[in-house]
């Protein structure tokens, strides 16, 4: 049976529109770092490169190579970890040019370094791009986190962050870090801003 993250991992990708606790296990990712406005052409190119690699893994059996442990699956959604430069932190309003980010796409558990190398080889042959050299492969484990579904434009996310901060305080939790994760369930190129769905997540720990 095809593994579909929306159905089989609902606790991670289909949260409620109010804050809740979740434990996020270790996960594998293609990742690329950057700085600046996410509305830029460079940001779009980085997304395209991540998807090229992700689909290279997904389509390997059709190219004649079936990785050990391979199973049919839906490619995971784009994610981002967001922070600000030191200068950006000093400002009273958000300057998107001062954003610092890591965008990523999760990979299935069967993915190994060998498979990653093959994916890079395939993309270099079929869709060569200079940004490929900036992509890394790694493992992350968020562990205990507070998350919620934000429905609406990205610029309205602060309204949801207020709710999350209230939940964190009420439940005697502390943020592990000020950076937050976003998981994009909608394609911003095809969905109007008011209907965008984004998972927002903070890593937390019990307050001492």
Image (cartoon, helix red, strand yellow):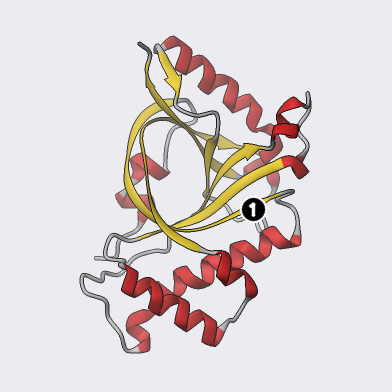
Q: Secondary structure at mark 1?
A: strand
Q: Position of residue 133 (x, y in %)?
A: 56, 70
In x, y percent, where is residue 193? 69, 45
How many neighbours does mark 1 have within 10 angstroms: few (below 14), some (14-19), or many (20 or more)? some
Residue 148, horizontal then vertical, whole percent: 48, 32
Residue extending furthest front? 86
Count of numbered marks = 1
**Residue in the image at 75% along x and 26% along y:** 90
- What is the quadrant of residue 111 in the picture? bottom left
Which residue carries the number 1 mark?
34
The residue sitting at 34% across, 65% down in the picture is 73
Q: Which residue occupies 57% across, 71% down?
A: 132
Relative to 108, say whether 145 is above or below: above
**Where does the N terminus fall, quadrant-wise?**
bottom left
Can you see residue 153? Answer: no
Above/below status of 83 relative to 1: above
Image check: 183 left or right of 128? left
Which residue is more in the foreground, 32 or 8? 32
Left or right position of 174 against 154: left
| Horizontal arrangement in the rendering, residue 97 relative to residue 69 (left or right) | right
Left or right placement of residue 98 versus residue 159 in this view: right
Question: In what quadrant of the picture does the C terminus appear?
Answer: top left
Residue 138 drawn at (x, y percent): 40, 56
Q: Is residue 133 visible?
A: yes
What residue is shown at x 30% (from left), y 51% (from top)? Answer: 8
């Amino acid at each position: 049976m095809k593994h579909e993250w929306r159905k089989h991992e609902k606790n991670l990708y289909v949260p409620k529109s109010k804050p809740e606790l979740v434990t996020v296990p270790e996960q594998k990712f293609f990742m690329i770092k950057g700085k600046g406005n996410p509305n830029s052409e460079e940001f779009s190119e980085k997304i395209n490169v991540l998807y090229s690699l992700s689909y290279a893994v997904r389509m390997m059996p059709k190219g004649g190579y079936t990785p050990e442990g391979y199973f049919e699956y839906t490619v995971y959604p784009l994610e981002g970890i967001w922070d600000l430069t030191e200068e950006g932190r000093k400002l009273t309003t958000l300057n998107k040019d001062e954003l610092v980010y890591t965008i990523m796409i999760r990979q299935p558990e069967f993915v190994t370094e060998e498979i990653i190398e093959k994916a890079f080889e395939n993309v270099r042959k079929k869709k060569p791009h200079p940004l490929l050299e900036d992509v890394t492969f790694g493992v992350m484990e968020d562990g205990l986190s507070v998350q919620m579904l934000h429905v609406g434009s990205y610029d309205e996310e602060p309204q949801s962050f207020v709710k999350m901060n209230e939940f964190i305080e009420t439940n005697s939790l502390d943020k592990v870090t000020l950076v937050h994760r976003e998981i994009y369930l909608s394609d911003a190129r095809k969905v109007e801003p008011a209907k965008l769905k984004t998972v927002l997540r903070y890593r937390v720990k019990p307050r001492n």
